[in-house]
Amino acid sequence: MGFIFYLVILIGSFLLTYLIRLAALKKKVIDVPNERSSHTVSTPRGGGLAIVITIYSGWSYLYFENLIEKNLFYALLFGLPVSLTGILDDIIGLNYKYRLIIHSISAGGALWFTGGLSKVDTGIFTLENPVLLTGCAFIGILWFINLFNFLDGIDGYAATEAVFIAAALFGFISDQSVLIIAFSAMGFLVWNWQSAKIFMGDVGSTSIGFTFAVYAIWYQNNEKLSLITSAILTALFWFDATITLYRRLRNREILTSAHKKHAFQRLVQAGFSHQKTVWLSFLVNLFLLGLAMLSFIFNLFSPVLLGVSLIILYTIVKMIDRKKSFA
């Protein structure tokens, strides 16, 4: 696709975010600061709807022009119920049971059209157990939906991550459908950069999490990109979410209670601005990108490179612990 196409996506996302912000203010769809918040000013939410609309508009154009594989498009369409759930949650709030049911249906539908997860190439050996791996992929999709939502907590953080991952995936695969995500998120990011004029909300964060999980499975199945390489590339988000959940379980905390214990939140509490925290995360992402590139080129060393990325991220978490205790 040409430059004009992506420029339209960018401008469309930018303008839609502005209009959604006006509507959110009028309808009082406002994020009021609470004990979990890393902001102090009431701010409209739901801006991620602009990302969703422009992404699916771009994908639909590719579909009708036969520029995206049909089964991938059908799998990604199952993100729409996730988006709808996010909208309702942003506006009226939804019980987690209903969210889980809808997210599970979306994950199952996406896996149907991707063909499940038949094998995973670790570089050293190949895991081939479609039933077990598809079950793990199902849980993985649900986890990605939620972890992106968990980590959408400071200005520009989740949107910057979406731009970075999408652009990196395009660099690996040259898949124009994933580049649409980057330009859609950039249009929204203009309004979400510190100090944010609007927040992404569940509609955006959950949809993006679902989308990246589906792409990772699709690329693995089509032997375009190893699942381990995708794991390295997205490690900043899933590692923070996973280790935080583990530590809260270990502390016997009530998992449904609000908290501000993710690494990025504790950095802000330690005195870092939202902007500085996002730039630091970007530097970490650049390092992870380097490891992902090595994994892509030297597939045999993928498990080792994944291990290196986890050691680095754990070291960063322990450094943050010294600035702001997890307890």
Image (cartoon, rainbow, N blue to C red):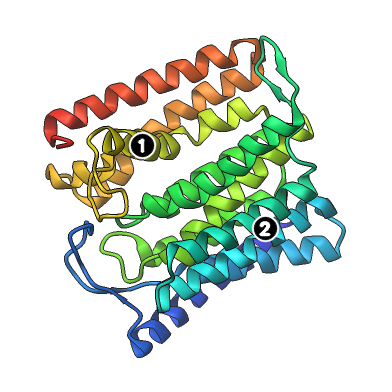
> Which label sits on residue 3?
2
323 sits left or right of 137 in the view:
left
Instruction: Give amino acid for label 1.
Output: Asp
The x, y position of residue 29, in whole percent, is 35, 80
The C terminus lies in which quarter of the figure?
Answer: top left
Q: Residues within 10 Å of mark 2 (few under 14, many from 20)?
A: few
The quadrant where residue 95 appears: bottom left
Instruction: Give amino acid for label 2.
Output: Phe
Report the residue at 51% width, 21% height from top. 291
**Nearest the eye: 33 or 132:** 132
Q: Is 250 located above or below residue 27 in the figure? A: above
Report the residue at 72% width, 47% height from top. 111
Report the residue at 40% width, 33% height from top. 239
The N terminus lies in which quarter of the figure?
Answer: bottom right
| Helix, strand or loop at mark 2 | helix
96 sits left or right of 55 in the view:
left
According to the image, label 1 marks what residue? 240
- Alpha carbons under labels 2 and 1: distance apart: 35 Å
**Nearest the eye: 117 or 230:** 117
